[in-house]
């Protein structure tokens, strides 16, 4: 693959696709409870992936690798999506959820250092901190000091933190144990594990009633095709190619991009502070994902360079 495509276009496409998941969730949640909505989403996705596996004649991993993939599926998809959807469903503003989950790159970097022994340079730590600061600027302009109607109940916070821990630990776990599997079959196993997780939650906690409105159908179509298939396959590819801390830093770009989408779709305010925050987040991510190139060696007279 051309270096420009792998270095810039794929990460940019991933960020855009991932950001639309928050908008799709807001469209779908009024018509179904979180675990029920996510279970239906996973089942439809599994059906499409099964056809893709057959079409590509993709290779299935062994039982040991499949077990690791299932753990990743519960963490990255089950805990993260379930936590985010339930935090929003219980009344917490999506921007506040984004701020809590926005700690993920820092948490992932810390876990990667401890578990994977990844080396995170001082420059990259500065980039991670800048990214978080940029996200905070975007959300501060949106909410300011006016938290009227914002639900900061204990359960909402618990669900948001649950999502944060799931995606952070899951990213590191995938990098450690799941990078050798075929992308399509590996994603299928992850979704099957997540679907089981959502089924348990739906039958234990919810009524499982669904109102199949046109809005829900359109939302579900995009969540399946754009996010569950498109964005996740790109995420697994990025984790395989890069350090966990570098991939995680891309999530700093999601809130600014989501704010811009909300401005285009819903006319939400997007002022100077939000745009400045987006630029700060971009600079922070650039510091994390770009590497200092070593200086060229000076040829020694009469010897090899």
Image (cartoon, rainbow, N blue to C red):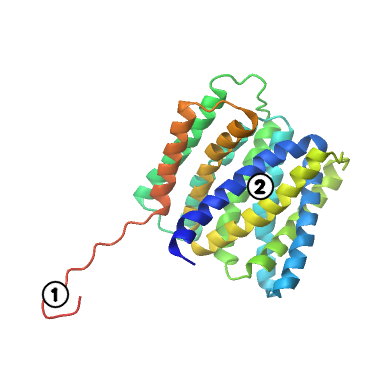
Residue carrying label 1: 300
Looking at the rendering, in which quadrant would you find the C terminus?
bottom left
Q: Nearer the viewer, mark 1 or mark 2?
A: 1
User: Quick one: SS at disc 1?
Assistant: loop
Q: Which residue is at the front of the view, 295 or 85?
A: 295
Residue carrying label 2: 80
Question: Would you say residue 33 is visible in this rendering?
Answer: no
| Residue at position x 41%, y 50% in the image | 288
* Quadrant of the image occupied by residue 187: bottom right
Q: Which residue is at the front of the view, 195 or 235?
A: 235
Coordinates of residue 85 in the picture (x, y in percent): 71, 40
Coordinates of residue 158 in the picture (x, y in percent): 66, 37
| Residue at position x 61%, y 55% in the image | 170
Sequence-wise, the earlier of marks 1 and 2 is 2
Coordinates of residue 212 in the picture (x, y in percent): 86, 41
Q: CA distance from mark 1 to mark 2?
A: 55 Å
| Residue at position x 68%, y 28% in the image | 153
Work out whether 51 lies above or below 303. above
């Amino acid at each position: 693959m051309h270096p420009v495509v792998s270095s810039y276009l794929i990460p940019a496409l991933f960020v855009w696709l991932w950001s639309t998941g928050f908008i799709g969730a807001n469209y779908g949640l009024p018509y179904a409870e979180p675990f029920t909505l996510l279970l239906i989403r996973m089942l439809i996705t599994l059906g499409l992936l099964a056809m893709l596996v057959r079409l590509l004649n993709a290779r299935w991993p062994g039982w040991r690798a499949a077990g690791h993939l299932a753990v990743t599926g519960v963490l990255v998809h089950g805990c993260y999506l379930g936590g985010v959807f339930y935090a929003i469903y219980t009344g917490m503003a999506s921007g506040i959820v984004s701020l809590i989950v926005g700690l993920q790159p820092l948490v992932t970097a810390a876990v990667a250092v401890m578990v994977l022994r990844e080396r995170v340079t001082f420059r990259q730590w500065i980039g991670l901190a800048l990214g978080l600061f940029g996200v905070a600027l975007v959300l501060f302009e949106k909410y300011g000091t006016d938290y009227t109607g914002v639900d900061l109940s204990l359960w909402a916070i618990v669900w948001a933190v649950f999502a944060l821990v799931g995606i952070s630990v899951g990213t590191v776990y995938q990098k450690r144990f799941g990078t050798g599997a075929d992308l399509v079959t590996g994603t299928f196993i992850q979704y099957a594990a997540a679907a089981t997780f959502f089924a348990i939650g739906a039958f234990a906690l919810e009524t499982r009633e669904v109102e199949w409105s046109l809005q829900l159908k359109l939302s579900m179509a995009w969540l399946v095709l754009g996010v569950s298939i498109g964005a996740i396959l790109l995420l697994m590819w990025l984790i395989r190619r890069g350090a966990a801390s570098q991939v995680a830093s891309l999530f700093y770009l999601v809130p600014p991009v989501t704010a811009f989408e909300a401005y285009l779709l819903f006319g939400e305010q997007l002022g100077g502070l939000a745009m400045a925050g987006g630029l700060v987040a971009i600079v922070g991510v650039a510091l994390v994902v770009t590497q200092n190139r070593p200086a060229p060696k000076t040829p020694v007279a009469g010897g090899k360079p």
